[in-house]
Amino acid sequence: MEKEKKIKVGITHGDINGIGYEVILKTLEDNRLLELCTPVIYGSAKIAAFYRKAANMPVVPLNQIASASEARDGANNIINVIGEDVKVEPGQSTEAAGQSAFIALERAVNDLRHNEIDVLVTAPINKRNIQSATFTFPGHTEYLESSIGDGAKALMILCNDIMRVALVTTHCPLNQVAANITTDGIVEKLTVFNRSLIRDFGIVAPRIAVLSLNPHAGDSGLLGTEENDIIIPAIQQARESKILCFGPYAADGFFGSGNFKKFDGVLAMYHDQGLAPFKTVAMDSGVNFTAGLPFVRTSPDHGTGYDISSKGEANEESMRQAIYAAIDISRNRRQYDEMTRRPLRRKYFDKSGDKEVLDLTKDTDADNDL
């Protein structure tokens, strides 16, 4: 049997003044990871060495390459995408850090589009200092939707072994959330979420809980009408498309009672409504997954960690789980696509008296009736 090709995992270094390099290097200390994938870091070998020494970490050999096509199996590979003169200032938000983060991200995304890498894992960025004439997005999710979405809609999913939380609105100011909640928008997110749970996570008939926007689910209109006017119609419309969704549930009681354990996914209306309880449960093991796009991208569920940068205190578990999740999702997609392919011509049954006759003379790309 031919040996399965290892998945090539592109890893961007994120903000060079944060904990990105520390969590990357700590993850790569475990050589067993090389049995699952071929890592390709988009960053700087010099900066990696700086953080290894500053945090007093063991040496992690890095194979320096010029392009992802040169990546060697059984080795941790790194592409130097920024110059050696870039100034590193641990714990500080600088323009140079933002530019370096974008250069690595842009190079990796280009390689992802051209199949030079199989999946993408991104270390945390600072959403403020990365802003420029070429990066005008609130975060990774919106940038990836624009650059490699090919018209598809991205969906932010925070996931671990216990919970999967998706968001209707992502990086949206709280005072604008209600205006951005629409029936069509919720149905769109439910559709993408449902498909991702099936294709990316291997769940046959996923059950999705939909959270309310207002306290106590609006209390029958007393505390807001969005539930009756927008969210409930969206749930009903999604059910007509055979999506198993339920709610709306008041967020406090839903998470506080452990009701989330009864569902395969939870759709929250806004960022902190879903991420605050998720990170309370899964801060060290949580993964941010960008669903809905043609390519797989994950990241740790934490930020740049400026306050502990270069101190050796960063927990790498979320980065490790992000890499594992990218590998698992890539495999799940490939398996699902193989199982649902329809390579055969359509087979027709015609009545001939009381006998059914199989007609294979007609050729079509339509679904198989058998």
Image (cartoon, helix red, strand yellow):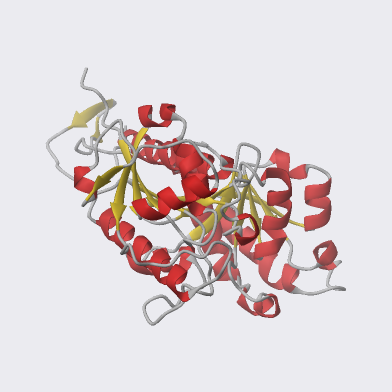
- Observer able to see residue 125: yes
| Residue 163 image-quadrant placement | top right
Q: Is residue 103 above or below residue 62?
A: below
Which quadrant is the C terminus positioned in? top left
Query: Residue 365 in the image: x percent, y percent?
Result: 21, 46
For image coordinates 57% across by 40% down, the residue present is 317
Q: Is residue 144 left or right of residue 205?
A: left
**In the picture provided, is 311 more to the left or to the right than 122?**
right
Where's residue 59, x and y in %? 43, 37
Can I make out residue 194 in this image?
A: no
Where residue 256 appears, as percent x and y from the top left, is 83, 48
Q: Give coordinates of residue 53: x percent, y percent.
A: 49, 46
Q: From this viewpoint, which residue is outermost toward the top? A: 1
- Which residue is pictured at 61% across the width and 50% down the height? 311
Query: Which of the two residues, 364 or 238, is positioned nearer the viewer here?
Result: 238
Say which of 306 and 153 sits in front: 306
Residue at the left extreme? Answer: 361
- Pick the front one: 212 or 275: 275
* Quarter occupied by the N terminus: top left
Can you name the residue that lies furthest to the bottom here? 133
